[in-house]
């Protein structure tokens, strides 16, 4: 039997994709026979020996293998131009064939984008279809966005969340998915057992212990992971998903790479947009080009987000005609507010829910 890692070689995969050999076969063994018929025997023998060692190293790390023809291989991923012929996994492979929504975005995310990421995961958990609040005025700027959601031929039902295990939006989406007990799939730009970035070590530990979690990669154990491996990973994230949500997208970023992959794969993309975002120029360009956009109200969020310093403007001057300090303003607000929900979002921002 040909080792799984035989099919992870970059040049060999390119050879197979160019001739669409994977579509002409029904098993990995059949594909191996077809590939070998084109290759030099000495080259094949060397590759098989190397691949056996790679398989052994992965097995030592308690990783498993899912090939392109396996019934658990993600069905949406099969449809892209260059699907991985072998996925290395750590975790529960039974979740790989489920229906996923991808949530991605910048590592340096704005507070409003992180907050909305948590809300979006909850929306997808409840199998809601994002739509305009019927009480909103017809001239409300978001009504066009809602029309995009409503016009979709398929409701945004999601069984799980897939993302890239990066800091920022990815981390927020996956952590929330775990907290809400959803199937959670992490696609890596490193070998499947490598914990990177180091700022996510706690999340990696949770994923490995989580019964509905799985980490996957197409990289071999000794492959060097670098800047180029992460854009390659992004095509897998979007390839697995039915719909792709970009929560904050700088003009030059991995999130923009994901957007381009999703468009090439003919996926439906949704861009989160809010005036408080600091790094969404790429998202703005995508919206200008006709991409679907959505905002807080489309997520059913009733309330507003304010910085602690803005609360001064909402309160009257004290008896000495001096403005209250930011902290005094906040304290006064908490005591006097009729709001049913005040949630700290970090960096001095608060969500103030409607009563």
Image (spheres, rainbow, N blue to C red):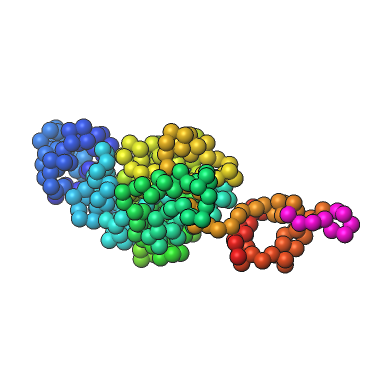
Viewer-proximal residue among 203 and 6: 203
Q: Is residue 1 magenta?
A: no
Q: On the rendered structure, is 233 left or right of 312?
A: left
Where is residue 124 drawn, in percent x and y? 40, 58
Identified at 35% across, 44% down, the residue is: 268
Q: Is residue 73 visible?
A: yes
Image quadrant in which the C terminus is located:
bottom right
Identified at 46% across, 37% down, the residue is: 287
Identified at 31% across, 45% down, the residue is: 239
Where is residue 232 drawn, in percent x and y? 36, 39
Which secondary structure is most common in the magenta stretch?
A: loop
Q: Is residue 233 visible?
A: no
Q: Give the residue furthest to the right.
A: 320
Viewer-proximal residue among 232 and 130: 130
Q: On the rendered structure, is 305 left or right of 3?
A: right
Identified at 36% across, 47% down, the residue is: 151
Where is residue 15 drawn, in percent x and y? 21, 33
In this picture, which residue range is highlighted in magenta?
Answer: 314-322
Q: Give the residue furthest to the front.
A: 138
Number of callouts: 0
Viewer-proximal residue among 211 and 321: 321
Where is residue 288 drawn, in percent x and y? 47, 34
């Amino acid at each position: 039997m040909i080792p799984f890692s035989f099919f992870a070689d970059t040049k060999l995969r390119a050879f197979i994709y160019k001739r669409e050999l994977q579509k002409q076969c029904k098993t990995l063994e059949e594909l191996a026979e077809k590939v070998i018929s084109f290759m030099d025997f000495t080259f094949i023998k060397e590759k098989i020996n190397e691949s056996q060692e790679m398989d052994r190293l992965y097995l030592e790390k308690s990783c498993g293998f899912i090939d392109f023809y396996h019934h658990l291989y993600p069905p949406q991923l099969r449809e892209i131009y260059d699907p991985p012929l072998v996925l290395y996994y750590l975790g529960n492979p039974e979740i790989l064939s489920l229906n996923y929504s991808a949530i991605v975005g910048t590592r340096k995310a704005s507070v409003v984008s992180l907050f909305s990421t948590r809300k979006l995961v909850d929306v997808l958990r409840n199998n809601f279809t994002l739509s305009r609040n019927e009480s909103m005025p017809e001239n409300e700027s978001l009504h066009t966005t809602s029309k995009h959601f409503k016009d979709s031929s398929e409701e945004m039902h999601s069984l799980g969340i897939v993302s890239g295990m990066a800091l920022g939006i990815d981390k927020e989406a996956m952590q929330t998915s775990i907290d809400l007990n959803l199937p959670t799939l992490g696609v890596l730009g490193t070998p499947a057992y490598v914990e990177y970035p180091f700022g996510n070590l706690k999340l990696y530990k949770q994923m490995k212990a989580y019964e509905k979690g799985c980490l996957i990669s197409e990289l071999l154990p000794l492959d060097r992971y670098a800047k180029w491996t992460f854009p390659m990973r992004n095509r897998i994230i979007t390839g697995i998903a039915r719909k792709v949500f970009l929560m904050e997208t700088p003009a030059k970023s991995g999130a923009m790479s994901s957007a381009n992959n999703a468009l090439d794969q003919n996926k439906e993309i949704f861009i989160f947009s809010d005036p408080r975002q600091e790094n969404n120029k790429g998202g703005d360009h995508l919206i200008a080009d006709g991409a679907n956009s959505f905002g807080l109200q489309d997520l059913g969020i009733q309330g507003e987000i304010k910085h602690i310093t803005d609360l001064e403007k909402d309160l009257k001057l004290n008896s000495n005609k001096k403005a209250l300090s930011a902290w005094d303003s906040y304290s006064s607000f908490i005591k006097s507010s009729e709001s049913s929900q005040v949630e700290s979002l970090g960096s001095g921002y608060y969500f103030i829910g409607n009563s």
